[in-house]
Amino acid sequence: MTIRAKRARVSFRQREVVLDMHGRKCAYCGIDIIGKNYHIDHIVPFSKCEENDVYNLVPTCVSCNMIKKDKSLEEFRQIMCKKAGMKDYVFEFEKTNKVDVSVLSYYQAIYK
């Protein structure tokens, strides 16, 4: 018997709000999200905080979300730096201020 991890359920309304908040772009790499080929990711992984607040959700391309999985932002940043051959990697949402940093800091602080 296989035990499945608890999955987050994100409503259609939440998806639309998150997509609109981020201009229908991947919050990590910035590519345009077209059609249904995207994921909704928890910035602070659901496995760590079980929080479905729209301020903890971002739209992502499939590639970015498959790399991030349940990693923290800093773990994901390190992977993206190596992949891009850079010393630092700035996520799209950091460039555009689309995520409320105070809310993100709150989630990261209480769910370490």
Image (cartoon, rainbow, N blue to C red):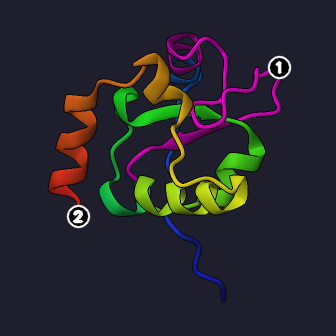
Magenta-colored span: 16-44
Relative to 82, say whether 43 is above or below. Answer: above
Q: Where residue 13 sits: x, y (%)? A: 53, 16
For the point 74% across and 34% down, the residue is 38
Q: Where residue 96 sits: x, y (%)? A: 47, 17
For the point 84% across and 20% down, the residue is 35
Q: Is residue 45 visible?
A: no
Q: Which mark is residue 112?
A: 2
Q: Is residue 13 magenta?
A: no
Q: Where residue 97 sits: x, y (%)? A: 40, 19
Q: Is residue 27 magenta?
A: yes
Provide the secondary structure element on which disc 2 rests: loop
Provide the secondary structure element on which disc 1 rests: loop
In the image, 66: left or right of 93?
right
* Separation (CA) of disc 1 from disc 2: 34 Å
Instruction: Please tell me in which quadrant of the rendered image residue 43 appears.
Output: top left
Q: Main secondary structure of the magenta part?
A: loop
Residue occupied by mark 1: 34
Relative to 27, say whether 106 is above or below. Answer: below
Residue type at mark 1: give it: Ile
For the point 62% across and 55% down, the residue is 80
Residue type at mark 2: give it: Lys
In the image, 101: left or right of 43?
left
In terms of depth relative to the viewer, which is nearer, 73 or 57?
73
